[in-house]
Image (cartoon, rainbow, N blue to C red):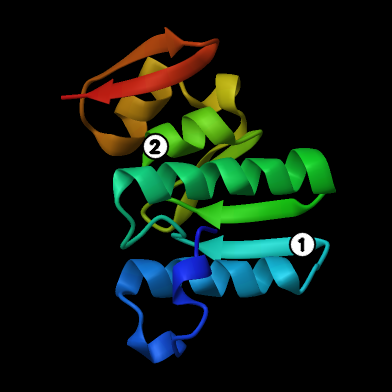
């Protein structure tokens, strides 16, 4: 989690992003089979948010963890998830694989804005406007 430089500090002395990463590190250290994360990329810059998503993906692929995330950044969901459950007005709007959910029609219907879906490295990238 790139926290070595903060090992001698108390958690309340860390910035919001540093604290977020420290809390995730504690969750990982607990070594549970299931991990639930509510917006783990909040308060993180692009570098740390992307690394967070890569770590979450590795938890699944290398350690066999089941990770359930709440994310508002569609492209992190697009690139790092196996399944997506999209909500609208507090109800499930779509659920399925990334390919099933991340379509121009589905996203436009859910979010009420125009979308284009590009393919980057075999994964969908959502452009909204």
- Give the mark, 2 or 1, whose residue is nearer the N terminus: 1
Q: How far apart are marks 2 and 1 (CA)?
A: 22 Å
Q: Left or right of 44: which side holds 102? A: right
Q: Quadrant of the C terminus?
A: top left
Q: Which mark is residue 74?
A: 2
Q: Left or right of 32: which side holds 35? A: left
In this rendered view, identify the residue nearer to me: 85 or 51: 51
Location of residue 47 (image quadrant): top left
Q: Left or right of 129: which side holds 20? A: right
In this rendered view, identify the residue nearer to me: 17 or 125: 17
Location of residue 34 (image quadrant): bottom right
Q: Is mark 2 on a helix, strand or loop?
A: helix
Position of residue 40 measured from the top left corner of the image (x, y, whole percent): 47, 60
In this rendered view, identify the residue nearer to me: 77 or 92: 77
Name which residue lies at 20% across and 29% down: 113
Above or below residue 41? Residue 53 is: above
Residue corresponding to mark 1: 34
Position of residue 87 measured from the top left corner of the image (x, y, whole percent): 45, 48
Above or below residue 105? Residue 19 is: below
């Amino acid at each position: 989690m790139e926290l070595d430089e903060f090992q001698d500090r108390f958690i309340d002395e860390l910035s919001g992003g540093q604290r977020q990463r420290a809390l995730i590190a504690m969750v990982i250290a607990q070594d549970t089979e299931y991990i639930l994360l509510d917006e783990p990329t909040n308060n993180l810059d692009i570098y740390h948010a992307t690394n967070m998503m890569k770590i979450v993906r590795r938890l699944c692929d290398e350690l066999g963890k089941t990770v359930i995330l709440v994310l508002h950044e569609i492209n992190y969901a697009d690139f790092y998830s196996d399944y997506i459950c999209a909500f609208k007005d507090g109800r499930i709007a779509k659920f399925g694989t990334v390919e099933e959910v991340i379509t121009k029609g589905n996203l436009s219907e859910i979010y009420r804005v125009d979308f284009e879906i590009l393919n980057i490295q075999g994964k969908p990238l959502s452009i909204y406007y």
